[in-house]
Amino acid sequence: MPDISIAPVTQATATLPAAPGAGAFPDAAAPLDGAAWRAHFPVAGDLAYLDHASLGPTPRLTAQAVAASLAEQGRRGSLAHPGLHEIADLARAEFAAHIGAAVDQVAHAANASAAVSLLAAGLPWQAGDEVVVPAIDFPSVVLPWMTLQTRGVQVRAVPCVDGRVEVDALLAACNDATRVVCVSWVQFSSGCRLDLARLGTACRKRGILLVVDGVQGVGALHIDVADLPIDALIVHAYKWLLAPQGVAWLYVGERLAERLTLSAAGPRSLTPRDSYFDHRFEPRAGAARFETGILGFHGIVGARASLALLRAAGAARVEAAVLRHAGHLARGLLEAGCDVQGGADRRDFQSGIVVFRHPRHDAAACRAALLRAGVVTAAREGHVRVAPHFYNTDAEIETLLRTLRDL
């Protein structure tokens, strides 16, 4: 909470520097895989970086924004602090706009696991209640609910075949005791993209809350939560949103907000007051009450820069580019004799993630060979995972395919 005796300082930290040599942003008509946009990504000068599902490379202007914010703290100390609180509020609003939410439905969080844990701890539970999750989902989706087992809550893991998370299978696992279904929008290990509209509609008919981990989708794929029957969306921004680590957001829908209580509290949770001795427990309105204390302000400054870059590129254009690259990859991998998990033409696998096995070499050997060729990928669960973003090029995809063919 800003010290009330210090006037807010906004100018020095609110202005984001432009990427050197590239202007603030290219013209809207500039190709996303062209030199103007690629100039924002230092990694593009050295590597064919196809590992955005692991870690998004920091754009130039994001790194500059963080450096400028830290320098301002070094130059002005506590005088710069109130401005950081204002920037955090701006970032919350900008992320809310990015996903189609109202600003009072979004809170800052430290990471995805912390956000899901907040939901798990804040809901009312009774012994015998159940939470349904995919068996192949990321630990952030599963583990927070397992802490409730001491209270008699059961976590039901639904088996998945070939990386596919079936809506029908999730719904079949639900019963009268099911209170929450928690899923990733896009699976980290397969790229399976879930039909949130269909799953959410069915959950609402049954009175079940739908909590969605959007980490592997938001930033690559367009989403509008106002049009989706989901109750929470959690996004850690260091992957497809290209932001620093330690910055995450939690969207809380109206239906969930009515049931959710605070499981933790601190100065940012409460309505502003004139004294730190004022300990009245009066939570802030909206989702911001789920913020407790000091945030990762400098990371949030960087996240604003990355959001601005993605906004300038255009959500629809970014999604189209990501899906085009993924299709190019899937077709080329199949032609090279690789096994593409889920199949290349499955519409529910249309995400930025393509996962494969080589017919003769294991995942570690493939990843090492690709890295020697300057192509960065990841090995996950016995497969090679490839995750291109909008600024990647057809030539980079072809380098990957050629390297695999030559193995």
Image: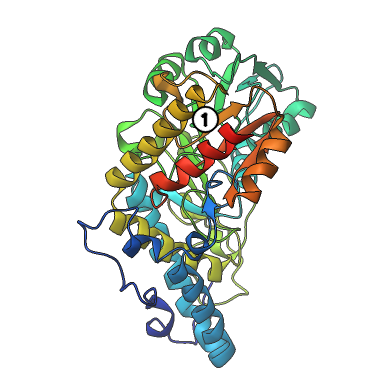
Task: Tell me: 138 left or right of 85.
Answer: right
Residue at point 54%, 7% (across, down): 172
Task: Tell me: 324 left or right of 258.
Answer: left
For label 1, the SS is loop
Task: Tell me: 315 left or right of 151.
Answer: left
In this view, the residue farthest toward the left is 29
The image quadrant where one finds the N terminus is bottom right
In this view, the residue farthest toward the front is 406
Q: Amino acid at mark 1?
A: Gly
In this view, the residue farthest toward the right is 150
Image x and y of residue 51, in percent: 56, 46
Along the line of sight, the residue nearer the viewer: 300 or 124: 300
Image x and y of residue 321, in percent: 34, 42
Image x and y of residue 203, in percent: 45, 18
Residue at point 60%, 43% (across, down): 377
Residue ID for mark 1? 191
Residue 34 visible to the viewer: yes
Residue at point 55%, 92% (across, down): 75
Residue at point 53%, 78% (across, down): 67
